[in-house]
Image (cartoon, helix red, strand yellow):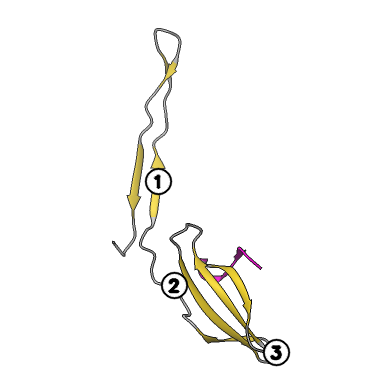
């Protein structure tokens, strides 16, 4: 099982079979190559799985990038071409800065 949507924004990148009744999962927090990876183990209880080792959460993201743009107004110039200006705002709203 790979690249399945997960809980808390992470997803399962890899699943490994452990000892009887145990499965190890590699969780990834994001889709970029630099995304943090965590190994977590789960044990079958007869009813469901419980986590037996590994982190239970990812640290705060170092980025929260927002991109916005103002509406574009196009005008026709003397040559008959449509021209205009496009203004972007790029903002990092993350609480963790690196």
Q: Residue 47 carries which label?
A: 3
Residue lying at 40% horizontally and 12% vertically, measured from the top left? 77
Res. 59 image quadrant: bottom left
Looking at the picture, does residue 16 appear above or below residue 97? below
The crowd level at tag 1 (other Cα within 10 Å; few <14, some 14-19, many 20+) is: few
| Picture quarter with the N terminus | bottom right
Query: Which of the pair 10/69 is nearer the observer?
Result: 10
Query: Which of the pair 87/17 is nearer the observer?
Result: 17
Q: In this view, does 73 lie to the left or right of 96?
A: right
Q: Earlier in the sequence, mark 3 or mark 1?
A: 3
Looking at the picture, does residue 98 appear above or below residue 18? above
Residue under label 2, please give it: 58
**Magenta segment range?**
1-9
In the structure shown, which secondary structural element does the residue marked by tag 3 occupy? loop
Q: Residue 6 carries which label?
A: none
Residue lying at 43% horizontally and 60% vertically, measured from the top left? 34
Q: Which mark is residue 67?
A: 1
Mark-to-mark CA distance, 2 and 3: 27 Å
Residue 45 lies within the magenta run: no
């Amino acid at each position: 099982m790979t690249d399945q949507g997960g809980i808390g924004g992470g997803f399962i990148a890899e699943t490994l079979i452990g000892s009887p009744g145990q499965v190890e999962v590699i969780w990834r927090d994001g889709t970029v190559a630099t995304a943090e990876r965590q190994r977590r183990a789960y044990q079958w209880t007869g009813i469901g799985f419980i986590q037996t080792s590994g982190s239970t959460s990812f640290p705060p993201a170092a980025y929260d990038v927002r991109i916005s743009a103002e509406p574009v107004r196009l005008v026709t110039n003397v040559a008959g071409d449509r021209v205009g200006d496009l203004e972007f705002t790029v903002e990092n709203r993350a609480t963790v800065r690196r």
